Amino acid sequence: MLATVVETSGSTYRRPGARMLMNRDRWIAGMISGGCLEAELLQSAWALTENGAALVKYDATAEADIIWGSGLGCAGVVQVLLERVKAPEPCLALIQRCQRARERTIVATVISEGPSLGSRCVLGGGGFAGDPCLKPCAEGSIREESRIVETDAGRVFLEVLDPPLNLLIFGAGQDAMPLAKVAHLIGWHVSVIDCREQFVTKDRFPTADRLAVTSPKLATDLVTLDVSTYAVVMTHNYLQDKDLLRQLLSSKVAYIGMLGPRARTERLLDDLDDKWSRDNVFGPVGLDIGAEGPDEIAFAIVAEIQAVRAHRAGGFSSSRSSREDSKRSRVV
């Protein structure tokens, strides 16, 4: 059973596109709420989908819902599409193939009540799967945000699925190990690059997707340096960091994190040609959360990268206004 959040309003825990996979044995992968809806769907999803896909609306805007309803207390509305899925499923197979190839995927899914509910098509990697009637809708998607559009087939949830964040860790020291582990935990694609063969091993980095042994001057030739790439430089060697920083600054990477004090990063930048923008250089790397030690610093680095990726300031969530929360939950 696949549950997908397709529309929200007000304050909600997850945004449209959040998914959960579950089976009758109460096994689940993923979450569509903070835990409120998961237990409910484990009990009701199969009955709701006996005759096909179903659209379920959870409205927690009324105070009475806290007592008599599902008890969310979030003051938001969540619409969830429920579908029984079986392998092999061509649309899911194409999405998986595109994710592995690190290619963007467009998914169009009908979310209007009726016989077409749940119909979808997928475009990506030069391939197509699903309902051909939805293909023009998917092909016309040029925006980067997921959104709902009105079509002849009804309301369509149009999703833009990018591959997992590509994290490059230059340096395989002791402090790189927890960073690779935390990044993998949240689904990022992690590459570890270092010139010391004895450090770049599967025993030290069991969760890394790629390990590479090479000199700093050749390191960037082995990896993709595009706008979906985020890099952290932590070799602990000034000259190596300088070589890497020069190459990263001349690329299109979205983020360059420099381990070490601010003065060190500024000196590195001053030693280099200043013809490149420094707007994507973050040194010292990581959010200022008082982190001490490799494990805490790893969390600070990952949090900062996520904030940059989401165009957020990285402050306290409790400081956001209710208006910001509402905007965060809305499909545009």
Image (spheres, helix red, strand yellow):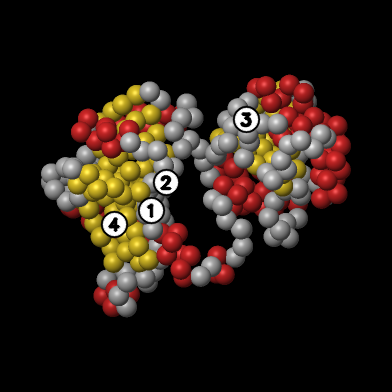
Looking at the image, is 62 positioned above or below residue 195?
below
Which label's residue is closer to the chain start, 3 or 4?
A: 4
Q: Position of residue 153 (x, y in %)?
A: 18, 42
Q: Residues within 10 Å of mark 4 (few under 14, many from 20)?
A: some
Horizontal and vertical percent for residue 292? 75, 55
The vertical placement of 312 against 138, above or below, is below
**Circle nearer the N terminus (1, 4):** 4
- Number of numbered labels in the structure image: 4
Secondary structure under tag 2 reads: loop
Q: Which residue is labeled 3 in the image? A: 225
The type of residue carrying mark 2 is Glu
| Residue 35 visible in the picture | no
Which residue is at a point 86% across and 32% down the rendered structure image? 239
Splitting the image into 4 quarters, where does residue 275 fall? top right
Instruction: Answer whether residue 8 is visible to the viewer in this image.
Output: yes
Mark linked to residue 265: none
Q: Which residue is mark 2?
A: 145
Which residue is depicted at the point 41% across and 42% down? Answer: 143
Q: Residues within 10 Å of mark 3 (few under 14, many from 20)?
A: many
Dot 1: what SS? loop
At numbered mark 4, what does the secondary structure look like: helix, strand or loop? Answer: strand
Q: How far across and how far down the image is residue 142, in percent?
A: 40, 38
The Cα–Cα distance between marks 3 and 1, rounded to whole angstroms, is 30 Å
Under mark 1, the amino acid is Val
Q: Amino acid at mark 3?
A: Leu
Foreground residue, 23 or 92? 92
Cβ atoms under marks 1 and 4 closer than 8 Å: no
- Measure how far apart labels 3 and 2 are at the Cα level: 23 Å
Q: Which residue is mark 1?
A: 332
Residue for badge 4: 79
* Label 1–label 2 contact, CB within 8 A: yes
**Left or right for 263, reference 248:** right
